[in-house]
Image (cartoon, rainbow, N blue to C red):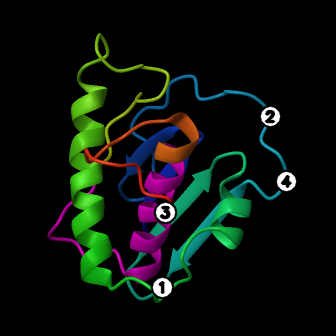
Amino acid sequence: MKNTLFVITIILIAFSCGSPKHITNTDKGAVQVGDTITLSSQETEYDIIIIEPGFNAWLNSIAQPEGYYSQQYLENKNLFYVNEWNSRVRQPQRFSPSLYELNIDYQSNIDYGYEVNYKLYNYFVYFQNRYKQNLLGGRIPLN
């Protein structure tokens, strides 16, 4: 059974067994053609779907190419990003609830595979640059 990890507009939603737990109003405007990336990995049984205007073009033109980072590097970064993201979701009085709406269910003991980690990591980099957010402290990564 496939597990799906979604990134929708500026919302990251984790689903297990392919069925949503709960979706709130995620309609932030029309999504243009080419703004949806779907990745399926038969080897790991995980999907990531990213719906974010401009992300696909950014990923293809600015992001480091696949293979640039090791899977371990991506997993470590994603774990920190997810922890900070979830912390911000729990603090709507401090961080914009329109940016941080839902928790991400990303677990360090699950092998999501290289491609899923690569897309998730690059989404975090894109998100930080586009929305002037800093999830790890220090400078915002360019790519």
Tell whether label 3 touches label 1 (CB within 8 Å).
no
Q: Who's the residue at 75% across and 28% down the image?
A: 29
**What span is colored magenta in the figure?**
106-127
Disc 2 crowd, CA 10 A, few/some/many (<14, 14-19, 20+): few
Q: CA distance from mark 2 to mark 1?
A: 30 Å
Q: Amino acid at mark 4?
A: Val
**In the rendered view, would you say 73 is above or below 56?**
below
Q: Secondary structure at mark 3?
A: helix
Asked if residue 69 is among those painted magenta in the image, a careful observer would answer no
The Cα–Cα distance between marks 4 and 1, rounded to whole angstroms, is 25 Å
Percent coordinates x, y for residue 103 in the rendering: 31, 38
Mark 1 is on which residue type?
A: Gln
Element under label 2? loop
Residue 40 or residue 71, whichever sits in front: 71
First reached walking from the N terminus: tag 4 or tag 1: 4
Residue 75 seen by the camera: yes
Question: Residue 78 placed where, x, y %?
Answer: 30, 61
Which mark is in front, 4 or 1?
Answer: 4
